[in-house]
């Protein structure tokens, strides 16, 4: 088991190429620059959300780079140092560290998508773009509409609204493409497992099984304790994270000329 953990950390990595954001996007979207150019209002609000998106994207790259260095060191049999201080870890601790890095990157991907929803919401709130959006609250009657705002807007809520009440075709279609992206859907179960479902990744650290119980008609109870044998392919997760990152940058590059026009 220990040798297998070491082997999975030291796998040869796939080549990853990152798609860059438009070179003049900062000039077109920075809130302070927009206000100085008398282009404030909803465009400046949307620019604030984009700045948060860019910070999250930067963190995704840094997480993937850290995982790459970690795996390269393991393949070369090198020690891990932080500020000239050797960090001693056994194989289980190394796997935990790798999974921690992956968890961070995955959470950042889906946080980015929710902030994309906020950016699109703010853009559409401008009177020239359709005005404020609304959602159907789950706990109220279907005829009661609630205004969409920062508290209740997510990637999912705004996409559901635009599926029923489309506005700008390019933006709406780009949201659909992002939602259907293979790598993003590949990573969704890991995000759900980290937040509110059973975490499949961390079950490989120590002895952690999945418990299932069933109450039978005869009054007896059947309880199963299953230990997962298959370790996660960290190289595959690393590649999917980078492809999800690229899907997000493609969305921004497709829509930025609309949300942040050159005028």
Image (spheres, helix red, strand yellow):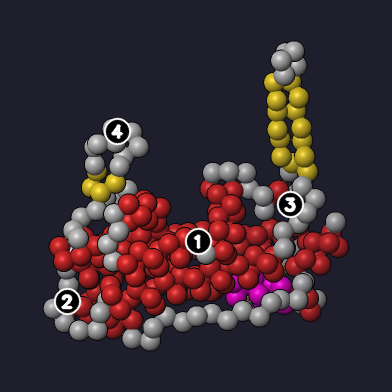
Dot 4: element: loop
In front: label 2 or label 4: 4
Circle 3 is placed at which residue position? 204
Of the numbered discs 3 and 2, the one sitting upstream in the chain is: 2
Q: Is residue 190 above or below residue 220?
A: below
CB under 8 Å between discs 2 and 4: no
The circle drawn on residue 39 is 2
Which one is nearer the viewer's eye here, 94 or 127?
127
Q: Which residues are magenta?
A: 63-72
Dot 2: element: loop
The circle drawn on residue 152 is none
Q: Is residue 183 above or below residue 26?
A: above
- Residue 152 x, y percent position in the rendering: 32, 48
Q: Label 1: how many residues lie within 10 Å, few (<14), some (14-19) or many (20+)? A: few
Q: Quadrant of residue 26?
A: bottom left
Of the numbered discs 2 and 4, the one sitting upstream in the chain is: 2
Query: Visible in this render: residue 214?
Result: yes
């Amino acid at each position: 088991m220990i040798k297998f953990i070491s082997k999975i950390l030291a796998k040869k990595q796939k080549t990853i190429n990152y798609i860059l954001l438009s070179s003049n996007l900062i000039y077109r979207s920075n809130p302070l620059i927009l206000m100085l150019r008398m282009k404030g209002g909803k465009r400046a609000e949307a620019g604030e959300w984009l700045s948060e998106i860019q910070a999250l994207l930067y963190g995704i790259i840094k997480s993937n780079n850290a995982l790459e260095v970690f795996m390269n060191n393991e393949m070369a049999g090198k020690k891990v140092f932080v500020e000239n201080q050797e960090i001693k870890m056994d194989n289980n601790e190394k796997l935990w560290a790798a999974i921690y890095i992956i968890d961070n990157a995955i959470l950042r991907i889906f946080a980015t998508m929710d902030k994309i929803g906020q950016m699109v919401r703010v853009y559409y709130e401008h009177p020239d773009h359709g005005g404020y959006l609304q959602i159907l609250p789950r706990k109220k009657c279907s005829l009661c509409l609630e205004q969409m705002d920062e508290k209740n807007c997510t990637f999912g809520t705004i996409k559901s609204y635009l599926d029923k009440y489309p506005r700008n075709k390019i933006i709406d279609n780009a949201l659909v493409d992002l939602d259907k992206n293979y790598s993003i859907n590949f990573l969704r179960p890991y995000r759900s497992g980290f937040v509110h479902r059973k975490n499949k990744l961390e079950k490989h650290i120590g002895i952690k099984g999945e418990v299932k119980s069933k109450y039978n008609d005869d009054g007896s109870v059947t309880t199963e304790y299953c230990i997962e044998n298959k370790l996660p392919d960290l190289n595959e997760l690393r590649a999917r994270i980078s492809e999800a990152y690229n899907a997000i940058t493609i969305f921004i590059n497709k829509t930025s000329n609309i949300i942040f026009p050159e005028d």
